[in-house]
Amino acid sequence: MGFAEVDSAVLFGLITMVTWGIWIVVGNAASESMDPRTAAAISYLVAALLAFGFIVVSDASLAVTARGGLLAGVAGLFTGIGLISMYIGFTHGSTTVVSTLGAMYFVVAAVIGIVVLGENLTLTKLTGIAFAVLGIVLVTR
């Protein structure tokens, strides 16, 4: 991976971090102002329109394979479940707890990567997962 690729990855990772952080706070405010299920639906409707608009103005391929379409659909299913769960969670707990637990999705992805996809379990990865679990414990107390 070249230096320019790392810079782009970091740039887009930072944009994701900041925008999702803002989304959580604004989503919490929306779920306090209206039914959280409706807020979740509006949030994803706007996101879907933005995504489709991006396809139109970019050079994205419209070719969909059966496998790719199925996997994207399953990913959307889990995204929707997580989104609805988050908005409803806001009505039952603090933004700090709900957003921190939700942001730990990378731990689930790491475990699936190691157990299902056969990725190597290194001491560094294990330490990172342990610190993430410790973070969850500390934030939820």
Image (cartoon, rainbow, N blue to C red):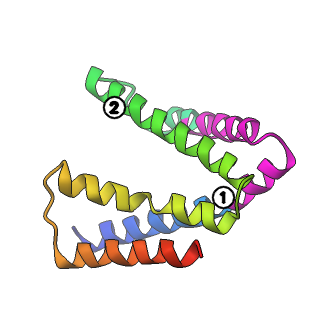
Where residue 37 appears, x then y in whole percent? Answer: 71, 37
Query: Image height check: is 98 above or below 51?
Result: below
What is the magenta segment's predominant secondary structure? helix
Residue 55 colored in magenta in the image: no
Which badge, 1 or 2, comes first in the chain's sequence? 1
| Span colored in magenta | 24-51
Give the residue displayed 42% in from the left and 29% down from the top: 73
Q: Residue furthest front?
A: 141
Q: Which residue is mark 2?
A: 71
* Mark 1 element type: helix
Residue 21 location, quadrant: bottom right
Where residue 48 appears, x then y in whole percent? Answer: 59, 35
Where residue 114 appears, x then y in whole percent? Answer: 19, 57
Question: Would residue 129 be found to the left or right of residue 1 on screen?
Answer: right
Query: Image height check: is 96 above or below 66?
Result: below
The amino acid type, in three-letter code, at marker 1 is Ile
Q: How many marks?
A: 2
